[in-house]
Image: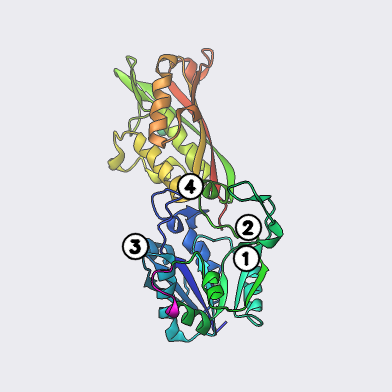
Amino acid sequence: MEKIAVLIVAAGRGNRAPGDAPKQYRQIAGETVLTKTLKCFAKFPHIMVVIHPDDQDLYEDAVSGLSLNIQTVHGGATRTNSVKAGLNALSAHAPKYVLIHDAARPFLQDRIIQNVIDGLSTHQACVPALPIVDALKTLDGETVDRDSVMRVQTPQGFRFDDIYKAYQDLPKSVNCADDIEIAKRNGHSIKMCEGDESNIKLTYERDFMQKTDTISVTGSGYDVHQICQGTSLWLCGIEIEAGFSLKGHSDADVGLHALTDAILGAIAAGDIGDHFPPTDPKWKGASSDIFLRHAKELVDAQGGNLDHVDVTLICEKPKIKPHREAMRAKIAEILDMPIRRISVKATTTEGLGFTGRAEGIAASAIVSLRIPDAE
Ligand code: MG
C-alpha cells in the first residue's frame, strides 16, 4: 500500500443531478458521497482529493470525522485539468502506482480495488469493466456488436510515472472522458478487470433516491391538555374560537404535541419534555410549531424523510371537521410535506371519560418515516 497513491476527482459541478450542493457533497445514508468514497480507501496512506475552490467549506465538513491522511489540491476547468493538477501534487510522494477514482462512486468494493491493483502487475493500466446487457444501436438504428464494447468504471489504475508523463505531454486543448483514454493515446498496455454493478456513478436524482439504504420506522405520540376558561384554543397549529381554552405551559396545542412526540419516537430521540422542559420559562406561551419544526430538523439531520402523518384529536368539542383542511395544510407547511401525506381526524368518546365530560382534549399521532440505516 505504501507505494500506491489514490487520487479522488471531486471538483465537478454535477449539473445533471440538481441539488443544493454538488453531488459529491450531498448526503446519502447520513453522510456525504465524498465521505463514503474516501472511506473506501481508508487503508491507503496517500490520498489526494482534487476539489473546486468554491467547495472548501463543504470539503472540510465532509472530512471532519475522518482520520485519514488526505491532502487537497484545487482542480481546473475540466476533468482532464483536475487530474493533471492532482498528479502534479502527488508527484512529490513518488508513488509507484496511482488509483484515479471519481468521487461520485461511493459504493466501491475492496474486491474491485484489488482487481485493479492485481492488473497493474502485468499491465501499465487497469480499468474495471462490465459487459453490456442491452442491445446497442447507432443513432441510425444500426446494430453495434455489444461483445466488442464494455462499460468502464473507476478506480482506474496506472503506473504513476507513465500516466504522469502522459498528462504532461497532453496538448492543452485535449479533454478526455477518463484516464484510460489518455493511457490509450500513449500506447500503454491496458488490462480490463472485473467491475461491479454496485459501483455506480451517482449521476441523476433517481440514483440518490435508490441507493440510500433506508429503513422504515414508525413513532407514536399521545398528549392531553385540560380545558380551561378562555376564548380560543390552538389545535394542530390553527387557532379556533371555541369559547374556552386549553391549559398548558406553551400554547397547549395538544395535536402538535402528540405529533412532535411521534416524530421523536420514530427516531428514538426521547420526548418533547426532554427537548423543551416545561420548567424552562423560555417556552412559556410558545407556539408549538417550534417543537414540531425542531423534531423535523432532527429527522433532517439524520438524513431521514417523513412519509406519512396521522393525527387523531379526541374531544366532544370543538367540532374539528370545519378546521380539518386548514390543520392539514398547516402541518404540511411546518413539515414541508405534501398535504396528501397528512391525515387529521377526530373522534369523540361518546360522552365517556374526561374527554366525554369536556374536561380535557386528547390527541394521538402516528408517523412513518424512512431513515438511513447507518451505523
Ligand atoms: Mg402537551
Are the residues at dot 4 and dot 2 in contact (C-beta closer than 8 Å)?
no
Label 2 C-beta lies within 8 Å of the nearest ligand 1 atom: no
What label does residue 269 carry, if any?
Answer: 4
The answer to which of 367 and 179 lies nearer the viewer is 179
Of the two numbered discs 2 and 1 on the same chain, state the one appearing first in sequence. 1
Start and end of the magenta stretch? Answer: 168-174
What label does residue 198 carry, if any?
Answer: 2
| Amino acid type, residue under disc 1 in the picture | Gln
- Indicate the position of residue 73 as horizontal and vertical percent values: 38, 73
Q: CA distance from mark 4 to mark 3?
A: 29 Å
What label does residue 67 carry, if any?
Answer: none
Can residue 246 be seen from the camera position used here? Answer: no
Label 2: state its secondary structure.
Answer: loop
Ligand 1 image position (quadrant): top left
Q: CA distance from mark 1 to mark 4?
A: 33 Å
Q: Closer to the camera: disc 4 or disc 3?
A: 3
- Indicate the position of residue 320 as horizontal and vertical percent values: 43, 17
Tell me the residue that label 1 is attached to.
109
| Amino acid type, residue under disc 4 in the picture | Ala
Q: CA distance from mark 2 to mark 1?
A: 8 Å
Are the residues at dot 2 and dot 3 in contact (C-beta closer than 8 Å)?
no
